[in-house]
Every structure is written in C-alpha cells, then in structure tokens.
Amino acid sequence: MPNMRATKNPMPSQDPNVRNKNFNEVTLGYTAEMAVDEAQRCLHCKNKPCVSGCPVNIQIPEFIAKVAEGDFEGAYQVISLSSSLPAVCGRVCPQENQCEGKCVRGIKGEPVGIGRLERFVADYHNEHNALPPKAPEKNGHKVAVIGSGPAGLTCAGDLAKMGYDVTVYEALHLAGGVLVYGIPEFRLPKAIVQKEVDNLKALGVKVETDMVIGRILTIEELKEEYGYESIFIGTGAGLPRFMNIPGENLKGVYSANEFLTRSNLMKAYREDSATPIQHAKRVAVVGGGNVAMDAARTAKRLGAEEVYIVYRRGMEELPARKEEVEHAQEEGIIFKTLCNPVAILPTDVTDTRDPAYGWVKGIRCVEMELGEPDESGRRRPIVKEGSEFELDMDCVIMALGTSPNPLIKSTTPGLETKRRGEIVADENGLTSIEGVYAGGDAVTGAATVILAMGAGKTAAAAMDAYIKGKNA
C-alpha cells in the first residue's frame, strides 16, 4: 500500500541566520530513511503523468520504485538512461512546474518530492561508487560541441554513449557553463558539477577550455579543417540586458552575470581570491527571476546589511521558483515590489572611496500598479503618477535577463538568428547550416537547465541520424 500522507518529507537545511553568512549548500538532502518514506508516497499511475512533464523523459515511477525498495544504485541506473546530470537536476530543476506539477498526489496535497529523490539517488551513487563509467567502443565518427553548459554536456554525453569521438569547446577556463559561473555554490556545489564533467570525460569526451569559437576557430574551420561531421552549438545566453536609465555606468553597478561570475567562478568571496568584488552595505537587485534571487542572496553572504529585490510587478508575479523566493525571505532579503528604478544616483566628489565622481549613492524609483495583461499573459505594470521616491544604495545589480552573445552569428555566414540573437533551429535543433545543430539558451534565450538538457538530448539523436544517413 502506498504511503498516503498528504505532505512531502521536509528538506533538511541550514538555519537561515547561519547560512546567509556562508556559501555552503543550503539544503542538506534526504537521509536514506526519508528517501524510502517519500518514495512510498508514489501511486505508480499507469499513464505516468510525471514523465510527460520531464523534458528529458526520465522514467520517474521506475526509479522511485527502486528507491522504495532500498535499491538506490538501481534507481540511479534508471535515471542515467535519460539524464547525464542527475545531481544537478535534482538541485536546480523547477520540478514544481514540470514533473511534480503533473503528479496526481498534488491534487489533494503535495506532490511526491521527485526532485529531492533524484538528488538523493545521485548523491548516493557519487558517494558509494568510485568507479567511473566505461567508455563505449568508438564508431569512427567525430563531432564537436560548442559550449559546456547543460545543453552541451547533455549532447556530448549522449553522443559519447553512442560511440562518437566528441570534443567540447569551452570559452572559459572551466567546463560547466552557467552551472559554474551562474548558479551559486550554496545552491549547486561546484564539486558536483566537476564530478558530472569527469563522468563525461570517462566516457571519452574531450574538453578543450579557453577556446572562444568565433575568435580562435570558426565553425567553418571546425568542419573543413578539423573534419567534424556535425556540430552542436550550446553557447547559452551570456549577454546581459540593461534598462538604459541614467547612472547605469556608475561604479557599483553590475550586471548579475558579472557579479555572479566573479563570486561563483572566480571565488571572489574568498580572502585569497585575486578577483575583486564590492562588499557593499546596501544593495538593490533589479529583477524578479532566479538570477535575481541568486544575486541578492550572494550579496547578503558577502556582508551586505540590507539587500532589496526591486521588482516592477507584485509578489504573485515573481518568475523565480517559489522555493528560491522562500529561501531569500528566510535569509532576510527585502522585497520591494510594484516598484521600478528610473535612475541610479551618483555620489559627489567628497565620496571617500574614490576622489573621482562616479560611485552609486542610491536609486530613484517610481511606484507601479498592475493593469491589463500584456503579450506574456501577465498584468502590465503602469507607473503611478507623482510616486517618485529615492532609496540609499551603494551597489545596484541588474538581473533583467540575457541574450546570446553575437560572436557566433557574426563569424558564421548563413547562420539564421532572431532579433535578439537567438539561433533559429527546428524541432530537432537543426540550424540553417547543414550538419550544424543548436539548442538551449542559444536558441530559446535564457531558460531552465532541464529545458537546455532536453534540447541537447534531442539534437544528439538528430545528429546521430544525420551522420548515419550521410554515410549510409
């Protein structure tokens, strides 16, 4: 008989007033007993609605059944048939909108904690199985993957399992893409990302770092001179957007990308780090998505006394995951909603930090109210007349979304892109150039890790079919 308790096993975590001062992982994970108990809540529906909500089609009831039996390694083997990054997905996927959003148990209570179980299974495997995966026999064909984020790593892993000679080209000095430069250590420990990358290397995937494709090599050169039969572009969306308001060029104004990259990838929070970062006292983070939550919570951990989320819609409209919003609130982040900056204010020449003019002193905002829905379906924010006010700040972080870097487009004749630079690709990831595929944020704009993984998986299958068809 299933466990019919209406609620999930709560996730153990650090105390909020302790964790907001360190970069250790916030959530601590299930124990084996908690995992088995949670797995027993699954009803094992015949039509498997949870699977339909998973972009990489993990056979969720099957892996949960293994957990319920205490066969944790067997559960990992089920997950790994579909996912190359289970320890990552179990931590950062928005399960509430995907697999758990389809769970029948969620109709009259809380859904089964699918993400928490996936994390437990992956962590159990990594702790108890030291042997790396075995590389399959090579099939004699070579492919290239540009970008080592979730889309690129998934595509590379699937192709390696098929026997392809795979080389991943990464622009930065460390593989992982947004998993290492964007998501903070307290949400996704970098040792976990490195473990997943090491597993791919064990499958035979070669990773070339410090390789800016479009500058060092072009896609045409990869095809013509290096002999890659097919190429996948998974370069993400790393170009930050700004509001184009007065004061955005002042010292103390960051894009969330720069702020998080300095902290996450370059470890600027460590005393021995060579990468500078501002340890501000009053910080405004403009935006309401997961990146905004990450930036705000990072600023708090760097010693800020007050950190504000400044968002032009209300709490109900925040696009960030509910769990991330709750964690931010617990950690003391202040939410200033229905509010929008119109200018960033400078200090005068008496500022003691710099004799020159140009540090942030505050922000000028206007109050907003919600009108009729816009094209996104959300109610459009409208400025309240005469509602201007100022907030004292010494740091402002813009977390307003990102677009793909234009470098690939500008160096690849014939590659079709959209207005903001997203690569045009069909349902299989095929671009306007034969044999060149793309997926993830480079195609969709900024989205989720699991959607990028799904795109990488789809493209890998299409690349395999393309190469086989060409050589038939």
Image (cartoon, helix red, strand yellow):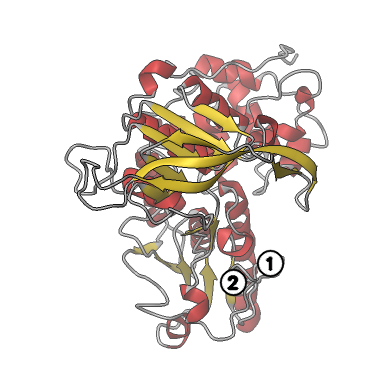
In this orientation, which residue lies closer to the viewer: 340 or 76?
A: 340
The x, y position of residue 382, in whole percent, is 71, 44
How crowded pointer 1 is (Cα within 10 Å; few <14, some 14-19, many 20+) is rated as some
Distance in Å between CA atoms under marks 1 and 2: 8 Å
In screen coordinates, is 226 left or right of 323? left
Give the residue at the far left of this rendering: 272
Q: Which residue lies furthest to the front in this view?
A: 386
Name the kind of residue labelled 1 in the image. Asn
Q: What residue type is labelled 2?
A: Tyr
* 63 to 144, vertically: above or below: above
Q: Position of residue 111 (x, y in %)?
A: 71, 24
Residue 381 picture location, percent across and down: 71, 43
Left or right of 260: which side holds 428? right
At a point 53% along the width and 64% down the height, the residue shown is 404
Q: Which residue is drawn at 69% across and 31% down?
A: 316
Task: State the residue position of label 2.
Answer: 437
Relative vertical location of residue 198 with respect to residue 50 in this rendering, above or below = below
Instruction: Say which element carries label 2.
Output: strand
Q: Where is residue 140 in the image (x, y as percent from the top left)?
A: 47, 75
The residue where tag 1 is placed is 428
Label 1 or label 2, whichever comes before in sequence order: 1
State yes or no: discs 1 and 2 in contact (Cβ < 8 Å).
Answer: yes
Q: Residue 9 carries which label?
A: none
Callout 1 secondary element: loop
Q: Can residue 23 be seen in this view?
A: no
Q: Which of 195 and 370 is in front in this view?
A: 370
